[in-house]
Image (cartoon, rainbow, N blue to C red):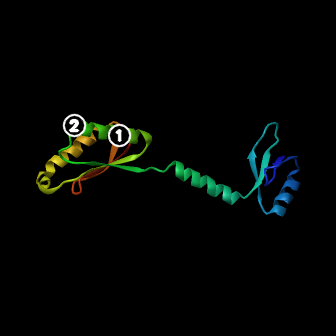
Amino acid sequence: MLLIDHENNNRGLTDTRDALQLAKEVGLDLVVVSKGDNDTPVAKLLDYGKLQYQQSKRQKQSTKVSLKEVKLRPNVGESDYKIRIDRALKWLAKGNSVKFLVRLRGREHQHRDRALELLNRVVEDLKESGKVQSFDRRTLTVVLSPA
């Protein structure tokens, strides 16, 4: 087999027993990196537990989904609404979840139905690119995840 030692030096063709002996002496594992061509595998001396840990850490980072938040008011203007919907579409396309939150102040609490209509409109406008994860009428929040 072709052997690469722990300092990334190419040792060339080495017998498997010699490679295992060298791994024991150094205190590392002998890992087959690739099968190679013409039945000549390529092996490397490294800490296999550390390798697995780094791979799982990289995998968790790549699959991390973030939650983006959009705050609205019940009397939001049409242009502001469109800007927020476009931004949410971009976030959903990237694989992020989006949380829409309607804030009420003062007398706006008397018109909760307008806030619910606004959230229903958001869900309707984004139904092609996102699916509803949760819809909370009490706190006036909607969480959409990518479709």
Q: CA distance from mark 1 to mark 2?
A: 14 Å
Please provide percent x and percent y for residue 71.
28, 49
Q: Amino acid at mark 2?
A: Glu
* Other-residue count near label 2 (Cα within 10 Å), few / some / many at <14 / 14–19 / ≥20: few
Residue, disc 2: 78
CB-based contact (under 8 Å), mark 1 and mark 2: no
Q: Earlier in the sequence, mark 1 or mark 2?
A: 2
Of 67 and 23, which appears nearest the observer?
Answer: 67
Please name whichever residue, 83 or 36, is drawn nearer the observer in this view of the structure: 83
Residue identified by numbered label 1:
87
Q: Secondary structure at mark 2?
A: helix
Percent position (x, y) of residue 139?
24, 57
At horizontal 79% and vertical 45% (from top left) the residue drawn is 42
Secondary structure state at the residue bearing disc 1 = helix
Which numbered disc covers residue 6?
A: none
**Disc 1 residue crowd, few under 14, some 14–19, many 20+, Cα 10 Å:** some
Total marks shown come to 2
Residue 9, percent across and down? 82, 49
Horizontal relation, residue 142 to residue 40: left or right: left
Apparent side of residue 81 relative to residue 23 in the rendered image (left or right) = left
For the point 48% across and 51% down, the residue is 64
The type of residue carrying mark 1 is Arg
